[in-house]
Image (cartoon, grey):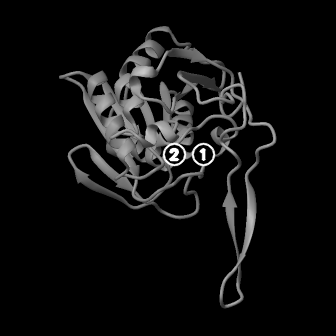
Amino acid sequence: MRILITNDDGINAPGLEVLHQIATDLAGPHGEVWTVAPAFEQSGVGHCISYTHPTMVARLSERRYAAEGSPADCVLAALGDIVGAAPDLVLSGVNRGNNAGENAMYSGTIGGAMEAALQGLPAIALSQYLGPRTAELADPFEGARTHGAAVIRRLLDHGDWSTDADFRLFYNVNFPPVPAAEVQGLRVVPQGQRQGSRFAAQPYSAPNGRRFMWIAGGSQQAPARDAPMSPPTWRGSCRSRRCGRT
């Protein structure tokens, strides 16, 4: 199997190393894992592409490249220039933090998977919920590292990989913020929204009097159909066409 991996946390992010391990397991001894990831963090860029300026791409090592662009740019660069023959599967992540609720609408991790789906390829985005329990672990990505390959195999074997006249389905997987041994199973849920929780602008005045703003996220504890009130112990999987709910 030939697998392309990308992310939005950047080429040096620990979650990308976890994803490379998962992809290597899936690809097998005769497979290939290609990495094309942003040179710098691209969290929150969604499905944007660098339409008005060129994107520099650098080869770091065999089958490992960094692009000065978004995750969607990375997928396009991989398919249009770097990888050659189309990959059998595109994986995006493992994101540092959840992509449940409205986070999915802003996520560069999901944007990478979405672009792959638009290109007609099977794609899965993966994210690791973080919380007090994962902070205690030597490896905060323990859940994803332990269960990632098995979850993807189940999706490949039993998921809906059909296409309609326009778009292919892709999947969004969130691993819960607990030790790997406490993960109870896999649950398929519709895309949700955290009620009463919104992204917002927070104004800031610099010492020189200039006006700036920070974009602040809402509470990650607010409930949604794919983001329960209590810390989840089930791996969650959403399926999407474009950004819409299914």
x and y percentages locating residue 230 in the rendered image: 64, 29
Residue pointed to by mark 2 = 72
Residue type marked 2: Ala
Is 195 located above or below residue 55 in the figure?
above
Q: Residue at x 39, y 58 (%)?
A: 39
Does residue 86 appear in this view? no
Is 120 located above or below residue 47 in the figure?
above
x and y percentages locating residue 132 in the rendered image: 51, 41
Does residue 236 appear in this view? yes
Could you give the CA–CA distance between mark 2 and mark 1, rounded to whole angstroms? Answer: 6 Å
Q: Which mark is residue 47?
A: 1
Dot 2: what SS?
A: helix
Horizontal side of 161 relative to 196 (left or right) equals: left
x and y percentages locating residue 178 in the rendered image: 47, 30
Residue type marked 1: His
Q: Residues within 10 Å of mark 1 (few under 14, many from 20)?
A: many
Label 2 close to label 1 by CB (< 8 Å): yes
Looking at the rendering, which quadrant does residue 215 occupy? bottom right
